[in-house]
Image (cartoon, rainbow, N blue to C red):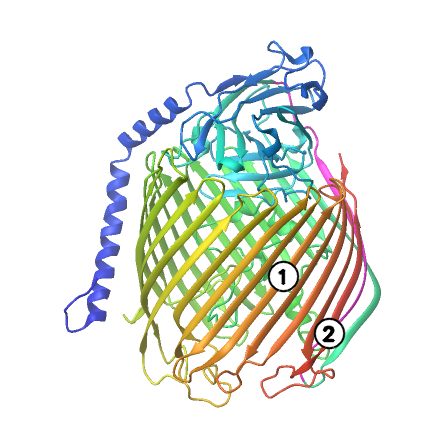
Amino acid sequence: MRFCASSPESSEVLLLRHARSCFALFIALFLFASSAPIARAQALIEKLTVNGSVTIPRVSRPPTLEDFLSMKPHPDFADGRMAMVDKFRQHNPHDGEPSSQKTEVYLGYDQKNFYAVFVCFDTEPSKIRGHMAKREDAFGDENAEIMLDTFADQRRSYGFMSNPLGVQADGIWTEGQNWDMSWDAVWSSRGKITTQGYVVWMAIPFKTLRFPSRPQQSWGLMLNRDIPRNSEENFWPQYSNKVEGRLNQEGVMKGLENISPGRNMQFTPHSTLASYRAPDLRDLNNPRYERKDLKGEMGLDSKIVLKDALVLDATVKPDFSQVESDEPQTTANRRFETFYPEKRPFFIENASYFTTPINLVFTRRISDPDFGVRLSGKAGPYSIGMLFADDKSPGRILPDNDPLFDSRAYFNVVRVQRDISNQSTLGMIYTDREYNGAFNRVGGMDGRFKLNANWVSSFQVLTSSTRFDDGTTAAGPLYFAQIKRTARHFSMNTVFSDTSVGFVTQTGFFKRPDYRQFQQGFGYRWFPKKSIIDSHGLYSGFNRAYDHQGFRLNSWQYLEYNVNFKGQSFIDIGSGFGTEGLRPQDFSSLAANKQYSTANYFVYFESNHFQKIGFHASVERELAISYATLGIFDAPPIGQAPRRVHDDSMEVGTTIKPMSRLRIDNKYLFERLYDPKAGLSQLNTHVIRSKWNYQFNRELSLRFIGQYGANLANPALTYLQRAKGFNADFLMTYLLHPGTALYVGYNSNMANLDPNLAMNSNGEVIRRTRFVNDSRLVFVKLSYMFRY
């Protein structure tokens, strides 16, 4: 959008203020007019789930997989002795149409377990996708899934999934947040492919679940069967994408009587024996290698269920040696911190209880904990999350002779939400990080409001107070508001956020203060029938961002088109253009505020059409600012302002399954910063990663990851060094079930470091041409879960 005013920036500031006022009025009108649409939405949902009710009988004996391998139930479970559900309908690609393959699900329970048996017929059984994989690594295979909303509040549901060979995955679905796959439960599953399809058997102990304490239970229920080769997601009852939300379309399950999770206490002691060698750069005047042989350590994880609803988790001396390394990203030209997802088991479990629109709980900030305590769960209409942990890393990065060596930071998080109305919530959050007299405290409230069948709005209001290590202070508010429309064809998303100069969070993932932003996005999707295309859509939008003095920090417009083809193939193309503003306070090499024009063009393609190989590739060109330019981070020589460069990137990946037990994931990343003024490249980055996993059986696996990375910098155009490295990671795992496992691992890293760790004037280890083995780790970890 262009304006002819004499001061374009002030005109756009007025536009932003006007948009903010209109947005606030828009939300108010929706709240005022929502009662009738909510009624219409409820009528539509009831129409969709008119047959979504089932009564579950108590079984006379536990069913087994063998009772159903003939694709019909054993007489002990026929004729109503187990409830039978069929008539699955598509969610994708053809909303509401019958499934292309017949599915029957048999449900029952006894005093200890809930049972579900999926009898999945297939007219082409040779095309069934099922691999012997490690737990939670069979996505892309056929999938049978049951969702249990044990509180019947349409807000949170347990999910239990299995591929045709019984390989498990589990998670928690939270409305508005989708899947949290960090939750790991102890349950049983088996599966087998037959001449007519496949059968999956599940036994879910009641002690694995949380539910109200009452003699008769009424739970929400959803059943799902995925058929990847047809891009089909099939559900019972009908789950339509004409309506926003999933659990508001669930069925009702009755008949469970006189059941209880009983006492549920878990204690998992673990011991680790490790030997390692790594550079110690804490004292830059005396860099050296740290080495320890056969260091042993013991720890304990525990879980105690309180009143069938709240879960108290505690960990002492946690060990995460077995956690897989992060997926590679190219980060050389990133101005702000790069996000890497949390992977440590203690911190990812029940993470959804701490989620808010603004990320205030990024647990990777707790990098070296000695203990942690978490309380999470639901009590009546209240969802509760509390987290307390220490972090040894602030003291461990200091030299041994520093007065603060071995000092700790402490993290405290409290989160409470209350259910209101129709899938709506109000919540509050408080976070606190304390270290040696310095602190960062953030508090505020947020809400999510289901306005009707398609519209959802949310908001968050926060304020922070911070005292830094040097004694200076900062404080200020943050405001966030969003309104979103989700439907089968037309979607829309509007976001406004305003972050003050003084707002800081040291517990969350947050990029920049002094940032006021308005975003608007639109999309429309078509679903042709009798075509090689399942669906295709067009998306466009814009954003504007300013600081509180009215200087434009970002502007962006984009257009994107994507196509989903039959057979799990996808293509996405798009482009955008805009500006980015930099200030002297951002880079001292700038004498005044400056606007840079930016643009990008990209193509992405992915296909999993073939059973044994999947492929994805992307190519992108950006006209962007180079943050690797010589001197802009005050590294000598000083004075060069950031330049606009061509930022070209490419990613190619393959997933190969040459046999049922072997999976090979390969990835190659390339990024080049080309300076058109100099006619030379500033930087070429290459990352090659190969991951091999061989599954001997469901419990035993061997994994290898090899990764090579190189930042090939041009010393005439960038302050970066030419850095190369290779990492090899071996892990043998015997996983009986979550909590009971044996791990044997080896990790070795090579880099082109100076063998004596000599430092340059920037405080970095000098890079040479030859590789040295700069670190290695050997470990054995054993854990065993005691469950009462």
The amino acid sitting under disc 1 is Arg
Q: Which residue is label 2 attached to?
A: 774
Do we see residue 31 in this rendering?
yes
* Residue 263, magenta (yes or no): yes
Circle nearer the viewer, 1 or 2: 1
**In the structure shown, which secondary structural element does the residue marked by tag 1 occupy?**
strand
Q: Horizontally, is 30 left or right of 396 in the view?
A: left
Residue 408, percent across and down? 65, 66
Real-space Cα distance between discs 1 and 2? 19 Å
The amino acid sitting under disc 2 is Asp
* Crowd tier of the residue under label 2, counting other residues whose Cα lies within 10 Å: few below 14, some 14–19, many 20 or above: some
Q: Quadrant of residue 503?
A: bottom left
Residue 604, percent across and down? 45, 55
Could you say which is closer to the camera, residue 603 or residue 270? Answer: 603
User: Residue 593 — which label?
Assistant: none
Residue 97, percent across and down? 41, 26
Residue 355, percent across and down? 50, 49
Residue reaching furthest bottom? 637
Could you say which is closer to the camera, residue 410 or residue 690? Answer: 690
Decide: is 212 above or below 473. above
The stretch of residues the image draws in magenta is 257-284
Q: Which residue is label 1 attached to?
A: 689
Q: Main secondary structure of the magenta part?
A: strand
In terms of sequence position, does the residue under pointer 1 or pointer 2 come before the other? 1
Q: Horizontally, is 85 left or right of 16 in the view?
A: right
Do we see residue 327 in this rendering?
no
Q: Quadrant of residue 50?
A: top left
